Image (cartoon, rainbow, N blue to C red):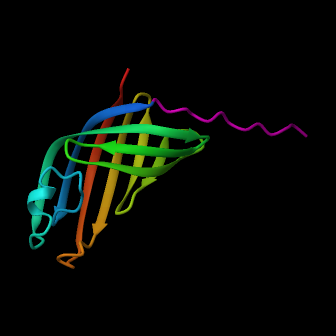
């Protein structure tokens, strides 16, 4: 019987930069460029096109990741898990989850967000696409 081999785990580059596009009912994320202006308003249709986003891999232990997402107005930590072949990962933070497809030095994330700010008590939700490229 042949011995099983464990596939090599892909080590991700540390820094990824790109853009995010979101559509939401209410402002759902501290990363949203208008969060400080509109977070407590009544929920309504909102969309934001192409705001810059940076992802830093703070720590990688095998397939498990600790990440930092940064925009011009906010930073947030998240955790992620890579698929065994390194072609995809799933990431979660306090209010959202994102499924990422990884192709070489590019990554595309499809994100969903759910939040209920204490001040308004009204549910807010959104979706978005994030496109990143590894920095060299």
- Give x and y (percent) for residue 101: 42, 42
| Residue 9 sits above or below residue 110 on the image | above
SS assignment for the magenta stretch, majority:
loop
Direction bottom: furthest residue: 121
Q: Which residues are magenta?
A: 1-13
| Residue 59 sits above or below residue 114 on the image | above
The residue at the point 25 percent across, 48 percent down is 74
Tell me the quarter of the picture where residue 56 sits. Answer: top left
Quadrant of the drawing holding the N terminus = top right
- Give x and y (percent) for residue 121: 21, 79
Tell me: 89 left or right of 21: right
Image mark count: 0
Q: Pick the residue in front: 40 or 86.
A: 40
Quadrant of the drawing holding the C terminus = top left
- Give x and y (percent) for residue 118: 24, 75
Tell me the quarter of the picture where residue 40 sits. Answer: bottom left
Q: Is residue 19 magenta?
A: no
The residue at the point 48 percent across, 46 percent down is 66
Tell me: 64 left or right of 39: right
Q: Pick the residue in front: 81 or 37.
A: 37
Tell me: 85 left or right of 44: right
- Give x and y (percent) for residue 83: 55, 46
């Amino acid at each position: 019987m042949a011995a099983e081999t464990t596939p090599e785990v892909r080590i991700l580059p540390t820094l990824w930069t790109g853009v995010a596009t979101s559509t939401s009912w209410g402002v759902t994320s501290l990363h949203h460029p208008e969060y400080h202006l509109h977070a407590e308003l009544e929920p309504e249709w909102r969309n934001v096109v192409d705001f810059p986003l940076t992802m830093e891999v703070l720590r990688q232990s095998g397939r498990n990741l600790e990440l930092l997402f940064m925009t011009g107005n906010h930073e947030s930590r998240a955790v992620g898990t890579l698929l065994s072949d390194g072609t995809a990962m799933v990431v979660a933070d306090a209010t959202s989850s994102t499924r990422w497809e990884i192709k070489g030095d590019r990554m595309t994330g499809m994100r969903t967000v759910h939040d209920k700010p204490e001040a308004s008590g009204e549910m807010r939700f959104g979706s978005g696409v994030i496109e990143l490229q590894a920095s060299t």
